[in-house]
Amino acid sequence: MADASVDGAGNPSNCVDSDFTGAYVVNEKVAFTAMEHGTQDDYDLVFAHEARNSAEHAERVLGWLRQMDGESPYQISRLDHCLQTATRAENDGADDETIACALLHDIGDVLAPDNHSQVAAALLAPYVSAKNEWIVRHHGLFQGYYWFEFAGENPNCRDVLKNHEHYEACVEFCERWDQCSFDPNYNSSPLQHFEPLVRDLFAKQPPSFY
C-alpha cells in the first residue's frame, strides 16, 4: 500500500478535494475488513485521513452555526442569539475560550435539539476547561429557571446542583449572557468577528484518544 503522506498544508497527499465544504475523495482504501487485521500501512492511511478531518473541524462548526441563521419563534434567529451571547461575554471581559463557548453553547440545536446542551458540551470538551464544559453541559437546565413553569416543570430544578463548584458560574452565564440575548436592538458583533476564536479553539491539540 502506498505511503499515506501529508503535504505541507497538512492534507493527505492521496486525497483530492471535491468542494469547499471539505468533502474529498480518498483514492486509496485500507486492505482490511475487520480492524483486527489492519497493518501499519493501513492505519497510516487512516491517521492521515483523521488528520485532515480534524484540520477541517472548525469550518464544519462554523457551517453549523450558519445553518442557525433562519426563521425562529424568537425576535431574532438562533444564530443572532449565539452572536449576541458571545458579544455580551466579550463586552464583559471574558477570555477567548469563554467567548467561544458562549458563541457555541447552542450549537447542539442543529445536531440534537432534544439534548442540545450535552451535545454542545461534548463537542467542546476536548478543547476547553472543565469549568466551561460543565457550564455548557448544564446551561439548558439552568435556563429552565426562566421558563420551566410554562411547561409544567419546576424552575428550580437546577438547585439539585447547588453545591457544585461551578453552579454560580452557570447561573451567571445564563443570567448575564444567555437568557437576555434575544434582543433585536442589541448591537452584536458579526460571525466574522468570532471566526478566528473558533479556528483557534479547534486548532488546539486535544488529549490523545479523548
Image: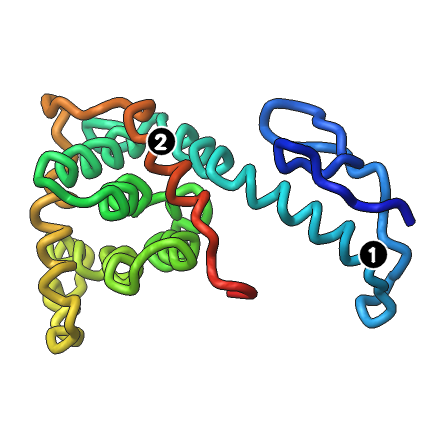
Q: Residues within 10 Å of mark 1 (few under 14, many from 20)?
A: many
Residue located beneath label 2 in the image: 196
Residue annotated with mark 1? 42
40 and 118: which one is in front?
40
Instruction: Give the quarter of the image for residue 131.
Output: bottom left
Picture quadrant where residue 183 is located? top left
Q: Amino acid at mark 1?
A: Asp
Q: Is residue 197 left or right of residue 179?
A: right
Left or right of 3? Residue 119 is left
In percent of width and height, residue 150 lies at 14, 54
Q: Which mark is residue 26?
A: none
Label 2 environment density (alpha carbons within 10 Å; few <14, some 14–19, many ≥20) = few
Task: Give the SS element for disc 2.
Answer: helix
In the image, residue 163 above or below residue 90: below
Q: Residue 68, image x and y in percent?
A: 37, 32
| Residue drawn at (24%, 32%) of the image | 83
129 to 23, vertically: above or below: below
Give the percent coordinates (x, y) of residue 160.
16, 76
The secondary structure type at the circle numbered 1 is helix
The residue lying at 23 percent from left, 56 percent from top is: 139
How far apart marks 1 and 2 lie (CA) works out to: 34 Å
The residue most toward the front is 8
How is this picture coloured? Answer: rainbow
Task: Determine the residue positioned at 71% across, 25% down.
Answer: 18
**At label 2, which amino acid type do we have?**
Pro
Sequence-first disc among 1 and 2: 1
